[in-house]
Image (cartoon, grey):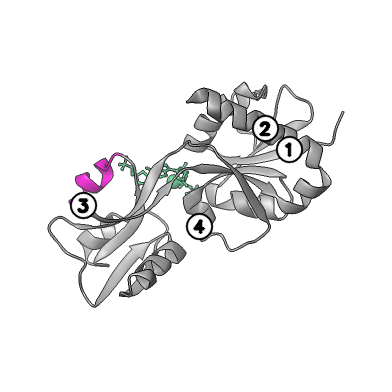
Amino acid sequence: MSEILTIALSKGRILKDTLPLLAYAGVTPIDDPDTSRKLILDTNQADIKLLVIRASDVPTYVEYGAAQIGVAGKDVLLEHDGTGLYEPVDLKIAVCKIMVAAENGKSIDQPRIKVATKYVKTARNYFASKGQQAEIIKLYGSMELAPIAGLADCIVDLVDTGNTLKANGLSPVAHIADISSRLVVNKAAMKIRHVQIKQFIRQIETAVAKKK
Ligand code: PRT
Ligand code: MG
């Protein structure tokens, strides 16, 4: 048996959308991930385990090598500072957009604006690239409330159907980036365990292609 391959992913939509890809690659968890309270899931392959953690913690686990592989949204990766990660496969799951949104009818064409977001780095880079002065206000959730409550002029957040914005009287005013989840790999592991990891990556690539 080869060394254990540990794959970090988050509960919710990423786990839900990753399981079919893993199944194509011949990997299925033993316990039902929806009902299990375990944070480490054994799979039908004795040398593959899944870690179920916070979405924003996935790059950290992989960068430090506690997991060799992970699945993380590009939104999370854009905010992560590390350089210890390869990003070899776009899994084309959990697809959405990262956008600027403001109250219906309001323009963000002001010399200086307040932006509420969980995506501080992405927001800062975006407004800098536009040459627009922005005060970035860090929030941890429910961004949609910020313009309504008068905390900020606009938000930077993920948008899928647009229903959440709509329900809160907001409209998208700018598109920043298309988002999907990526397979990430620890750089040292890729070198040291090249054969095992390359083989896994190839299986996942095939699964992504087949799913289309
Ligand atoms: O645990 P933690 O809070 O760190 O992570 P999380 O709660 O963001 O995890 P989760 O499971 O909600 O999302 C994980 C990943 O899914 C994100 O990092 C994205 O890469 C991806 N994803 C894809 C989304 C969405 N689509 C999405 N629509 N994540 C969140 N949303 C939210 C969005 O923030 C907004 O509140 O859904 C709402 C908008 O959806 P619509 O359809 O109303 O536009
Ligand atoms: Mg959440």
Which residue, given by chain and number where applicable, does mark 1 sit on?
198
- Residue in the foreground of this view, choosing between 104 and 137: 104
47 left or right of 9? Answer: right
The Cα–Cα distance between marks 1 and 2, rounded to whole angstroms, is: 6 Å
Work out whether 166 lies above or below 99: above
Where does label 4 land, which residue? 78
Question: Contact, CB < 8 Å: mark 3 with mark 4?
Answer: no
Dot 2, crowdedness within 10 Å: few (<14), some or many (≥20)? few
Say the numbered circle drawn on residue 6: none
Disc 4 crowd, CA 10 A, few/some/many (<14, 14-19, 20+): few
* Residue sitting farthest toward the right: 1
Mark 1 and mark 2 in contact? Answer it, CB < 8 Å.
yes
Comparing labels 2 and 4, the label whose residue is closer to the camera:
2
Q: Earlier in the sequence, mark 1 or mark 4?
A: 4
- Disc 3: residue Cβ within 8 A of ligand 1's nearest atom: no
Image location of residue 21, percent across then percent down: 57, 27
Which of marks 4 and 2 precedes in the sequence?
4
Give the CA separation, mark 3 to mark 4: 23 Å
Query: Which secondary structure, mark 2?
Result: helix
150 sits to left or right of 127: left
Q: Position of residue 138 (x, y in %)?
A: 41, 66
Q: Which residues are magenta?
A: 161-171
Residue designated by label 3 = 171
Amino acid, disc 4: Leu
Going by the numbered disc 2, the residue's amino acid type is Arg
Q: Residue 202: give its label.
A: 2
> Is the residue under label 4 in contact with that under label 1 (CB below 8 Å)?
no
Mark 3 Cα-neighbour bin, 10 Å: few <14, some 14–19, many ≥20: many
